């Protein structure tokens, strides 16, 4: 077994049930099902439109936007446009579509987590960023790879080896439970970035993470 197919250990609660399931649908409403018992990931299996796919794949790597910030979901779309301006990505219909899509995903995560504040990481990736299978040390994360191969999933067997459990394609969206998901279930579904180092592939990757506890977030509405 390759070194990259070992898991970063998670500290389990004694006797706790594990959330290992993956729910998939062609409807974005599936993302709300992340709260169901036993669900480790909810995946929106959507397709990029041909025009959008052609546009985003043709962007020179040096013009791909980069954004890392803590923001209210209502400001995310404007932030993406600002990042595009800084990278020199020309304004236009497709750029508007990209920014509005990210803004809509931020709204969906805010509703699911009842939390308006989030950290956005939107950037090009050319390395094996998170190459080991792991569970994120946070309550939840929304992922979307707009360009390049998507996130891979795995489950740990009784011998500590990783059994592959599928992958995401470009444009698909997932909400994953993290290690600090509220409740008694332990998140048992692992994930990693696809290994692309040395291939010449460039991913344009989005991660949205809720920033504060839900009880505190309600006071911010």
Image (spheres, helix red, strand yellow):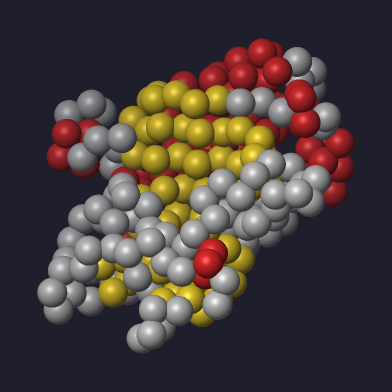
Q: Quadrant of residue 79?
A: top right
Q: Quadrant of the N terminus?
A: bottom right
User: x and y percent of residue 38 in the render?
Assistant: 32, 74
Q: In this picture, is 162 found above or below 110?
A: below
User: x and y percent of residue 48 in the render?
Assistant: 74, 50
Q: In this picture, is 23 found above or below 173?
A: below
User: x and y percent of residue 202 in the render?
Assistant: 74, 42
Q: Residue at x 70, y 18 (%)?
A: 87
Q: In this picture, is 35 found above or below 18?
A: above
Of residues 168 and 199, the one drawn nearer to the viewer in this rendering: 199
Total residue callouts: 0
Q: Quadrant of residue 85?
A: top right
**In-image side of 60 versus 114 (left or right):** right
Q: Residue at x 31, y 47 (%)?
A: 138
Q: Residue at x 21, y 41 (%)?
A: 214
Q: Residue at x 55, y 25 (%)?
A: 67
Q: Quadrant of residue 159?
A: bottom left
| Residue 12 visible in the displayed image | yes
| Residue 30 visible in the displayed image | no
Q: Quadrant of the C terminus?
A: top left
Farthest residue to the bottom: give it: 158
User: x and y percent of residue 196 in the render?
Assistant: 70, 52
């Amino acid at each position: 077994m390759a070194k990259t197919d070992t898991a970063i250990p998670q500290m389990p609660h004694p006797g706790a049930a594990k959330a290992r399931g993956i729910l998939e649908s062609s409807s974005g409403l599936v993302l709300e099902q992340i709260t169901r018992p036993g669900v480790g990931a909810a995946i929106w299996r959507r397709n990029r439109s041909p025009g959008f796919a052609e546009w985003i794949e043709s962007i020179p790597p040096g013009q791909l936007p980069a954004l890392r910030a803590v923001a209210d979901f209502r400001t995310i779309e404007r932030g993406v446009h600002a990042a595009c301006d800084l990278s020199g990505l020309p304004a236009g219909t497709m750029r508007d579509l990209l920014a509005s899509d990210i803004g809509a995903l931020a709204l969906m995560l805010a509703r699911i987590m009842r939390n308006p504040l989030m950290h956005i990481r939107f950037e090009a990736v050319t390395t094996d960023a998170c190459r080991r299978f792991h569970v994120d040390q946070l309550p939840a994360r929304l992922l979307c790879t707009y360009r390049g191969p998507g996130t891979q999933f795995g489950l740990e067997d009784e011998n500590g080896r990783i059994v592959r459990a599928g992958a995401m394609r470009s444009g698909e969206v997932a909400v994953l439970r993290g290690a600090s998901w509220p409740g008694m279930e332990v998140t048992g579904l692992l994930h990693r970035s696809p290994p692309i180092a040395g291939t010449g592939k460039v991913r344009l990757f989005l991660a949205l993470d809720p920033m504060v506890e839900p009880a505190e977030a309600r006071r911010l509405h």
